[in-house]
Image: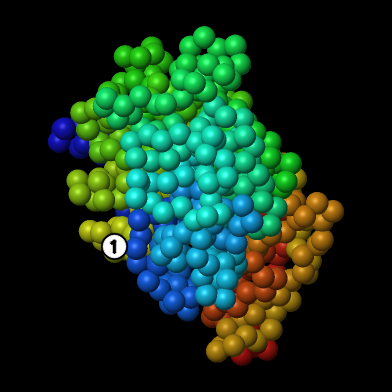
Amino acid sequence: MRNIFFKILLVSLFIGGIVTANGQNSPKHEFRGAWIQTMFQGDYMNLSVEELKTDLIKKLDDLKSMGINALVFQVRPESDAWYNSPYEPWSRFLSGKQGKAPADNFDPMSFLIAECHKRCMEFHAWLNPYRAASGGGVHLAPSHIYHKHPEWFFKFNNYIYFNPGVDESINFICTVVKDIVTRYDVDAIHMDDYFYPYPSPGLQIPDQETFKNNGRGFTDIEDWRRDNVNRLIQALSATIKESKPWVRFGISPFGIYRNNTSHPDGSATNGTENYDDLYADIMLWVNNGWVDYNIPQIYWEMGHAQADYVTLAKWWAAHKGKAELYYGQDVARTMKVDQLTAKMRSVRELKGVGGYCFWPANELFWNNKGVADSLKTSYFKYPALIPPYTRLSTHKPHQVSEITMSPGNNGKLSLTWGAVVEDNVSEGAHYFVVYAFPHKSKINLSNSKNIIAITPYTFAEIDLPAKKMTYVVTAVNRYHIESKGRVLKVDKKNLKRLR
């Protein structure tokens, strides 16, 4: 295992375009996400609203300082809500008791969306589709849908799940998602690896009666189960795009699709499988364009005997399909074996892989073995834009209007520009990027080192230059497609006036 690791590391060091130790070749477009879980996080339910706001703002500021540009936040852990839902009760992980609203009916998701967008970070609303209760002792609020329609559910291993074979389950979950997308300015709907429950020795999923009554012509119950999940994913994709076409639909599946012992095209691994164990046919979804991004949870180490990280990274890259591909990284496992450098480099060398998502964000907040410091000073030293979703749109927003400059606060330079209103709100300016170049140097918008500000506002305060400079401002739309740049030159005369 040691030899394998160092061989990979040495190969990475000599491949062109890979990030160097100080982040010099950091990509301009890269998804840099972090998951914040709320399930079983008892620290939230003991906070007042003001304490909760303070805690969430600190976490966002910390993530921003590390270079993270997308927050994946768990808003529906067990058919409940971290937002004001007309269909599901408030989460017990928020208030301590399911159905109990926060003081003043505070809406954490609405708050987080606004705070993320202030920082030009995306907000991905993370939902578990089927889980309704995560243990036999969970007290479900009177308003929980289980009490009204127990026939939509089954119990397995002390958990309660929506029965995927019941048509009404699909309809209800789509209703919940449509409500979120319609009423909240989310950037994406995100679902993780929990579809049918993970296998448990000696237990059988209690859906034989549903298969008998609603088999839709299937003769194999496993094919029927996969089709049940396929129908949900396809329906959710259509629901989201019909509501707001710029909102993405992302899945973060378990890290193994199929082992090559189950199918010749599977990975050289030996572990639980999406297709055969969880009835999640990820390849069908990405090849049909039903999901916009895929974040397989490649949580293992390089050299792992059953599920080697490099083997899986290469397998998923070779089976990308139509979806954007990012990799889920387990921070604790990675730092335990000191493989952060090799993993970061291996992702950036693979064609078609657009970034990372870190699990869990708490490990970043705790700075496990210096991981946050490494992101800040090396791998994410320079900012990155989310990779553009050109499969959804190819429209560039209009250039910003003329840039003006004036003295800013505390000796800063204030730049102001105008945004041109577009007919289609999703294709108009959503945020702006400011670049800086020394006088007479080549304008290169592809190098992230030249980015000095990313802002949702039509102004930016930057350091007053000591010498002549050229600034360029671009507009970026909801699909992360960038406009042409508008140029402003600051000469000696301007500098004298501004001082």
Q: Secondary structure at mark 1?
A: loop
Tag 1 residue: 367
Residue 335 image position (x, y, % from top left): 24, 51
Colour basis = rainbow
Residue flagged by tag 1: what amino acid is it?
Asn
- At horizontal 52% and vertical 39% (from top left) the residue drawn is 150
**Placement of 427 over or under 254, stated as above or below:** below
**Placement of 85 over or under 173, stated as above or below:** below
- At horizontal 35% and vertical 56% (from top left) the residue drawn is 40
Residue 464 image position (x, y, % from top left): 57, 81
**Placement of 184 over or under 227, stated as above or below:** below
**Placement of 262 over or under 390, stated as above or below:** above
- At horizontal 50% and vertical 36% (from top left) the residue drawn is 153
- At horizontal 52% and vertical 19% (from top left) the residue drawn is 211
Residue 350 image position (x, y, % from top left): 42, 34
Residue 435 visible in the picture: no
Residue 97 visible in the picture: yes
